[in-house]
Amino acid sequence: MRFDIITIFPEFFGGIFSHGVVKRAIANGLVEIGLRDLREFTHDRHRTVDDRPFGGGEGMVLKPEPLIEAVESLGVAPRADRDTARESVVLLSAQGAKFSQAVARELSALERVVLICGRYEGVDERVNELACDRELSIGDYVLSGGELGAAVIVDATMRLLPGVLGNEDSAAYESFGRPDEEFAGEQDGPPRSTHGAGGLLDYPHYTRPAEFRGLAVPEVLAGGNHDQIRRWRRERALEKTLRNRPDLLEKAELSAEDRKFLERLKSRR
Ligand code: SAM
């Protein structure tokens, strides 16, 4: 899979893709990341990428000409002819649809994603209309530029590609993961490092030492009873999701046992 990032700060990405899983995926040829310096698509002495907003108001706006030229230089198909099942041009924007694990899954099925990083007050809207397939926001807050958002999207998307994580199941068995039903028949034997989360948050993890500063690892985890461990993990995931992200419970795949457990938790509150 290839990502191309259009930015006025290509040096921003100097270290961000040089660690851990991302670094390995690039070294193994599973992922390519290209950087396009927006200023290389300007034609004036000052390499101007921005201008004042029509209608007045605060700040500056990224001009359309360099951005459209930068997209065209990447050889992606014009928007009208684009096969969006293969490639997608994404505008990073606080006004975008919210990026999520589900969107990361969608993007990971593509061969190529172009990410346009805005700056200042944002990007001339015609760039969106002429070149972009979607606008994505990484959360309900305003960043000073799209670069952090692009890095988040690259990271979350590429770790879903086959071969990128050492253990193929890691991405399925974690927060926002697939429901247990998709792993039917795989629930016997020792519990995996995680347990199909089914849209819930992940459960808490523990490693050695068994006791740390007066806090012991929950007994059940050392007990070796696989069914009890699975149930304990499921209940902790339900508990954590109810506490931190109750909205996720509305769409999560819940069994009758899960629902009963949640009712008990709520009645204790
Ligand atoms: N005037 C814009 C607004 O109120 O929506 C904010 C512009 S922001 C200061 C500059 C750039 O940062 C945006 O063009 C976008 O590329 C990026 N950005 C800001 N917040 C973002 C977010 N939550 N997700 C993704 N990109 C964001």
Image: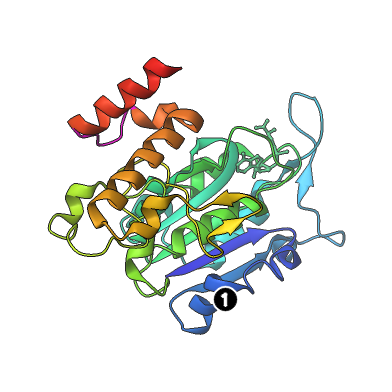
Q: Amino acid at mark 1?
A: Lys
Which picture quadrant has residue 127?
top right
Horizontal side of residue 122 vs 59, given as left or right: left
Residue bearing mark 1 = 23
| Residue lying at 43% horizontally and 29% vertically, measured from the top left | 242
Task: Tally the numbered discs.
Answer: 1
Asked whether 156 or 200 is in front, the reply is 200
Estimate the x, y position of residue 26 in percent, counting from the top left.
52, 78
Q: Is residue 96 above or below residue 177?
A: above
Give the main secondary structure, helix, strand or loop, of the magenta stretch: loop
Q: Which residues are magenta?
A: 250-255
Which residue is the extreme one toward the bottom? 28
Q: Is residue 2 above or below residue 230?
A: below
Horizontal side of residue 45 vs 267, given as left or right: right
Estimate the x, y position of residue 261 in percent, counting from the top left.
30, 28
Quadrant in which the N terminus is drawn: bottom left
Estimate the x, y position of residue 140 in percent, counting from the top left.
60, 32
Estimate the x, y position of residue 225 in percent, counting from the top left.
26, 56
Asked whether 199 or 234 is in front, the reply is 234
| Residue lying at 31% horizontally and 21% vertically, measured from the top left | 263
- The answer to if 61 sits in the magenta stretch is no
Asked whether 16 or 45 is in front, the reply is 16
